[in-house]
Amino acid sequence: MNDQNNLIEEIFENDDQLTEKQKKIIVAAIESFAEKGYASTSTSEIAKRAGVAEGTIFRHYKTKKDLLYSIVEPMIAKFIAPFVINDMKKVLDQDYEQFEDFLRAMFENRISFIRRNLLLFRILVQEIPFQPELQKMFKKHIASKIYTRFEDLVDHYKAKGQLVDLPASTIIRVTVSSIFGYLIARNLLFPEINWDDEVETEQTIRLIINGVSPRE
Amino acid sequence: MNDQNNLIEEIFENDDQLTEKQKKIIVAAIESFAEKGYASTSTSEIAKRAGVAEGTIFRHYKTKKDLLYSIVEPMIAKFIAPFVINDMKKVLDQDYEQFEDFLRAMFENRISFIRRNLLLFRILVQEIPFQPELQKMFKKHIASKIYTRFEDLVDHYKAKGQLVDLPASTIIRVTVSSIFGYLIARNLLFPEINWDDEVETEQTIRLIINGVSPRE
Amino acid sequence: MNDQNNLIEEIFENDDQLTEKQKKIIVAAIESFAEKGYASTSTSEIAKRAGVAEGTIFRHYKTKKDLLYSIVEPMIAKFIAPFVINDMKKVLDQDYEQFEDFLRAMFENRISFIRRNLLLFRILVQEIPFQPELQKMFKKHIASKIYTRFEDLVDHYKAKGQLVDLPASTIIRVTVSSIFGYLIARNLLFPEINWDDEVETEQTIRLIINGVSPRE
Amino acid sequence: MNDQNNLIEEIFENDDQLTEKQKKIIVAAIESFAEKGYASTSTSEIAKRAGVAEGTIFRHYKTKKDLLYSIVEPMIAKFIAPFVINDMKKVLDQDYEQFEDFLRAMFENRISFIRRNLLLFRILVQEIPFQPELQKMFKKHIASKIYTRFEDLVDHYKAKGQLVDLPASTIIRVTVSSIFGYLIARNLLFPEINWDDEVETEQTIRLIINGVSPRE
DNA sequence: CATGAATGAGTTTTCATTCAT
DNA sequence: CATGAATGAAAACTCATTCAT
């Protein structure tokens, strides 16, 4: 019960109308989907895991796909929330003199978010290739909202001479790839290795910074 | 027919005992798996697409999973082949004085390989999370074979003062992430964008090199 | 609300203990049953249409079938009421010298009743084949009550030389068939045609009369 | 087995590609649908009755509705076949000098057809109210093909002075209603009564003829 | 009285796999 | 070797009915 609350508290925290059973269903679904994938998880399995009748699932979610969406959508929403704050630029100006500072803050903040919601992240990464609906959501939010903000940011730091003269798209892509590469290696590919997160993130950041900083 | 041959010629080229029907089955399976995922593709669908009877599939592959493995395994084998040649180190010494040269060669070579076998790459990336068997293959080949080779390489170039003083693992991870990040963005996430591959790879490499090169 | 009252006012007029919600349930059930048939209508659908909770239906009607019966039964009762008045024969003697007059009165009276309660008629006609209970009700009322009365009537008019010398059963059957044939064609099979009811009923009656009148 | 063959031999006679199992499915479906109605018959019940696996049904018929259509459609086709012969009019001129002769021939021919395929007729009559698809089929065939032919016929006999001067539509409706009224009463409503078919049809025809013949 | 969440048995449908031809 | 009809277990989903609030 505690674990379960942890699992969903951050993403579904203000969903007050969630029944106790509904919460159990969500938790069971998250665990199952993350474990075996959406397509290979049966609703009967979810029901059993949640300790509810199979019909109960369909009372709350019209279809199995609905259940998937209702799980992933809030995750995406929460993930991008920090990027959508209106005065991000202003905040940046004040708080992060150096691109490195911004990167470090971002890295720590979003990486810890993902780690807190690791199963959901798994599901997102695993199901995006198969769910056009998720792709749409992803592109709509990530591509149009976050990306343009990042572009502004990159231009901002470029103007301050802190970034190498390459297209923003490339800088962003390499930066994000490196971060996600770390996340995926750490959590999905080789979770059994004993990672020293602090050191690893620090070194990854250093590499990125090294890469995007202009040589005098 | 031509297209189909292209699809499988590189990976299955020396599989001489493949009957015509078997080839059709493989092609149909590759297309279907890449499109909708292994779990969501039915054998009847593959049979229809291949123009054979359902039973024919099971004459050649004991189970559906067998079919998947028989498709992905050769792909992995071909992918890692260049890394496994015995005298890789020697070759490197002679051919690539600079890490940058090596990286560029690697990048071009393996990226073009993946692009030639894009559907198979898709399947590999998509199914790895769900197929422990694939994970085992992946880890066995990539982790133990390629990775140790890469470690040697990194140490080699480090000794020559061409690489920053960070753990080989980090350098490799960031390098590989950036490459795969490009591949995934280019081919899976935003295939509709009009990419200038030459420019993009060049800039990506420059960023990587910049990152891993020590500042004097 | 007005429409709905029209729908049920005639049949359920003196059912004073019907709550507002109950009325809504009945109306919703009538509409749904008529539209898609009893078996294909779900109680949840009825509840939604009626704007009540699903449980409310079962508070008033023990089962779904109960709901059906409680709808159809009063309809049958009202339909046969005129035939059951005790002194029907006397009335006839006085009012309808000619069989034709009787037929015309009957026709107009009962047809207009059915048209006012068309949905209920639909349900009755549609469900009789599937509901033995309804069949029993139908046979009990129609067959034993109405039919014997009709037999008397036919004999009465036969004695007056107004009817051809055929078995009462045949005369009744053809007469009733022709009337119902009209009703069904008009309302169920081809409701989209622009019928001139007055003309049609008149001609139908003329045909019937012609058929059952003896030639000199 | 014999019974079953009787059930389907006339309608599905030239459907040579019907498997033995398929025939059993059709027979079981016809019996079940006629008994309890389409909506209240489960496919598992049909499978059990047919002695096949439930999956077998869906191998031959994509959906349950498909099964229904594939049963009813040929029945309609066979039923209307005699009306669609091209030279119906010519045949009539020669064979049936009197409308009465035609009516008698028609009556006997089609009534015996329906009686031979009584279960199918039941299904058709019972399901038409619920299946828009069937309604379309019915209207298309009956309304446009048979009806216009009947209109010609009525006009033909009217010109010969054998029919009363009422609209063809009315004459047809009353005639057909009387016939179907007999069929339904005899077979569906009161099958337990001991009908003397020969006498009954004869008397019904006499009533109809009486009705549609002009008085001098 | 009314609600609506919950149920579990049942429904239609799918699908990997087998096997007689 | 190839076929495709047949299977039966399991999938997603429906629904009449119950019951705590």
Image: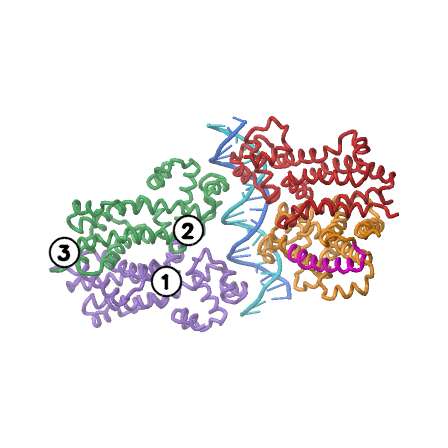
Chain colours: A green, B purple, C red, D orange, E blue, F cyan
Same chain assignment for discs 3 and 2:
yes
Q: Depth check: B65 or A10 in front?
A: A10
Q: Depth check: D169 or E6 in front?
A: D169
Which one is in front in this view, the residue at disc 3 or the one at disc 2?
Answer: 3
Badge 1 amino acid = Phe
Q: Secondary structure at mark 1?
A: helix
In the image, residue B115 lies at what x, y percent?
34, 66
Which residue is found at the position 44% from the left and 73% from the top? B16
Q: Residues within 10 Å of mark 1 (few under 14, many from 20)?
A: many
Query: Does D193 sit above or below residue C56?
Result: below
Badge 2 amino acid = Gly
Q: Which residue is mark 3?
A: A161
Q: Main secondary structure of the magenta part?
A: helix
In the image, residue D188 lies at what x, y percent?
74, 46
> Are dots 3 and 1 in contact, CB under 8 Å?
no
Q: Which residue is mark 2?
A: A37
